[in-house]
């Protein structure tokens, strides 16, 4: 069984530096919002939100005073239009806010807004969160380095994120692993590639409930895509293993599939494939990526103790002295990716 892995202690929110906020503005991520996270905290009452099997979801449905509701409803619809239609207000006529949920679990404590189109009763969600530098760097790196595009907006202390469709990883493992051998191999393959994506850009804490699995029917079997949905632990912790999903015991069921179906040389092949794809994405977005790294390497995203621990562990892992000159988490991320681009990236998943 793979060993457990948990954050050393609760992470405090990290302020967004002015250079980073300027970067976000240049790339159309910063926008003036009609309502902010702290405004949504002024709800009047809340009740626990239960799932279809009457289990507590750890979310609460919140209710606002009637005198405030019209303002909340209008503001949430406008934010949805900013997120989805570049602010086109014509869509607002057919939208309404069906429900607002609040999660008290974890660091993020997000609000989840359910929007319904009254013409066809179709619904969508988005999230309102406290803006945090780690989370924002995680979102930008996801957009540049992963196969997934990410839509988000920020205004001072408030972050707006789109909903990422997919089956939560823990639910997926409970209900979807008993499949054909062909699909099991594809699931194990995708986990190897996901593991690689997280480690290259140092996204931590990818336990099963912090990512979703998107299933696409194919000519034969299905295709699987794992997508991170929690970016709170982007390059913050000091332990190298924290950035490798393979070391979280919650992911053991998929690890066991790999042990059952994959040979070591096949694992290495999939790792090389994913590294090549990441390198291609870096080169395709070279100007934006270089600009981002220029800001990130000067930012303060963690403690000196964690920075020193991580650069020591990564230096030992890569058999490289290049991490010794790093003084920030941004420099460590930059150095890790530079090793990838130089094809000097040594990493193997333990199966």
Image (spheres, rainbow, N blue to C red):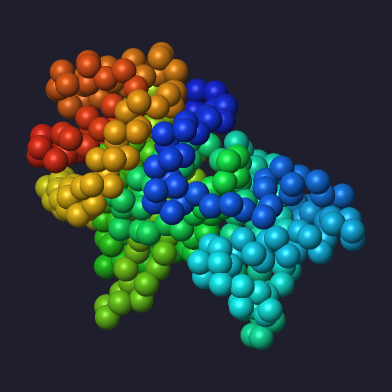
Residue found farthest to the right? 66
Image position of 75 with respect to 2: above or below: below
Residue 199: tell me if it is visible.
Answer: no
| Residue 122 vs residue 52, the one in the foreground | 122
All told, the count of numbered labels is 0
- In the picture, the quarter occupied by the N terminus is top left
Residue found farthest to the left? 343
| Residue 133 vs residue 59, the one in the foreground | 133
- In the picture, the quarter occupied by the C terminus is top left
Residue beneath the point at 22% across and 21% down: 323
| Residue 198 vs residue 258, the one in the foreground | 198
Q: Quadrant of residue 112?
A: bottom right
Rendered location of residue 121, percent (x, y): 66, 81
Q: Is residue 179 left or right of residue 110?
A: left
Rendered location of residue 217, percent (x, y): 36, 76
Q: Quadrant of residue 224?
A: bottom left
Rendered location of residue 205, percent (x, y): 45, 37
Residue 290: tell me if it is visible.
Answer: yes
Residue beneath the point at 28% across and 62% down: 186
Q: Is residue 80 left or right of residue 166?
A: right
Q: Is residue 218 left or right of residue 277?
A: right
């Amino acid at each position: 069984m793979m060993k457990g892995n948990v954050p050393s202690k609760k992470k405090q929110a990290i302020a967004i530096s002015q250079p980073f906020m300027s970067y976000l503005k240049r790339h159309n991520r910063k926008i003036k919002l009609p309502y902010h996270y702290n405004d949504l905290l002024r709800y009047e009452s809340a009740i626990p939100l239960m799932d279809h099997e009457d289990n507590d979801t750890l979310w609460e449905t919140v209710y606002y005073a009637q005198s405030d509701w019209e303002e909340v409803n209008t503001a949430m619809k406008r934010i949805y239009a900013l997120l989805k239609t570049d602010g086109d207000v014509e869509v607002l006529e057919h939208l309404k806010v069906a429900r607002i949920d609040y999660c008290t679990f974890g660091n993020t404590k997000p609000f989840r807004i359910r929007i319904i189109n009254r013409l066809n009763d179709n619904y969508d969600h988005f999230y309102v969160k406290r803006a945090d530098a780690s989370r924002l760097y995680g979102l930008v790196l996801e957009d540049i380095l992963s196969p997934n595009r990410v839509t988000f907006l920020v205004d001072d202390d408030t972050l707006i994120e789109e909903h990422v469709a997919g089956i939560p990883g823990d639910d997926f493992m409970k209900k979807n692993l008993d499949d054909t051998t062909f699909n099991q191999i594809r699931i194990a393959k995708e986990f190897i590639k996901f593991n690689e994506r997280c480690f290259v850009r140092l996204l931590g804490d990818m336990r099963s409930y912090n990512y979703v699995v998107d299933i696409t029917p194919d000519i034969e079997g299905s295709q699987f895509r794992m997508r991170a949905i929690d970016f709170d632990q982007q390059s913050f912790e000091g332990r190298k293993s924290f950035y490798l999903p393979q070391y979280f015991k919650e992911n053991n069921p998929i690890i066991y599939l790999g042990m059952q179906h994959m040979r070591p040389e096949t694992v290495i092949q999939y790792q090389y494939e994913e590294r090549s794809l990441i390198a291609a994405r870096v080169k395709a977005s070279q100007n934006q990526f270089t600009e981002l790294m220029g800001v990130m390497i000067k930012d303060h995203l963690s403690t000196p103790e964690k920075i020193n621990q991580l650069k020591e562990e990564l230096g030992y892992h890569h058999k490289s002295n290049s991490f010794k000159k790093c003084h920030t988490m941004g420099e460590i991320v930059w150095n890790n990716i530079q090793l990838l681009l130089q094809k000097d990236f040594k990493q193997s998943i333990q199966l």
